[in-house]
Image: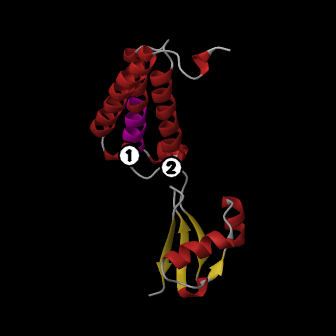
Amino acid sequence: MSDAIYFDSWAGLLRILIIGFTAYVTLVVMLRLSGKRTLSKMNAFDLIVTVALGSVLAAVILNRAIPLAEGVLALALLIFFQFVITYFSVPNDRFERLLKSEPTLLVHEGRYLDTALKRQRVTRDEVGAALRAQGKLSVVEVRSVVLETDGTMTVVPQN
């Protein structure tokens, strides 16, 4: 039985250390240069880009067939696309609506909006957890609960 499944070579381990460190530092620098928007709370589009960045980083570190320069270019391309898309979504509402969902009202004036809960696949227990996090025991204590575009729930108290 071959030992290659447990250990191949010291050179392979050294390559992973060097490429991993270099690719990681490069990714962090590129993310910092791209601005806070790239690292903000995520909507669905941001999540896709983040997963893709992680996938590229892992591929560059572990796949010997991918040179560091190609991996860095792939990371830069994803960050560039993220920057361009968010740049154009700011002044263009239609473009932004294609990428982002809109906030959804889940509770209004102390009553659950069951149609909205079902459409967003949110349970009353999840809304209850958001209420408790804000020190509220019941929906009758709040004006509304809003499911934000990043998946968080905002609890708006009564006046």
Instruction: For mark 2, give the secondary structure.
Output: loop
Q: From what the image shows, is residue 51 above or below residue 141?
A: above
Residue linked to disc 1: 39
Residue 112 image position (x, y, % from top left): 66, 77
Q: From what the image shows, is residue 44 above or below residue 150?
A: above
Q: How far apart are the alpha carbons under marks 1 and 2?
A: 11 Å
Residue 104 belongs to the span the image colors magenta: no
What residue is shown at x 36% (from left), y 39% (from top)?
87
Q: Nearer the viewer, mark 1 or mark 2?
A: 1
* Main SS category, magenta section: helix
Q: Quadrant of the C terminus?
A: bottom left
**Colour mapping used in the image:** secondary structure
What residue is shown at x 65% (from left), y 81% (from top)?
111
Query: Quadrant of residue 126 in the image?
Result: bottom right
Q: Which mark is residue 151?
A: none
What residue is shown at x 68% (from left), y 68% (from top)?
123
1 and 2 marks in contact (CB < 8 Å): no
Residue 21 image position (x, y, % from top left): 34, 28
Residue linked to disc 2: 43
Q: Residues within 10 Å of mark 1 (few under 14, many from 20)?
A: few
Residue nearest the viewer, comparing 62 with 157: 62
Residue nearest the viewer, comparing 80 with 6: 6
Residue 70 image position (x, y, % from top left): 41, 16
What residue is shown at x 29% (from left), y 34% (from top)?
29
Q: Could you tell me the amino acid type at mark 1? A: Leu
Left or right for 103, reference 26: right
Q: From what the image shows, is residue 31 above or below residue 121?
A: above
Highlighted range, magenta: 80-91
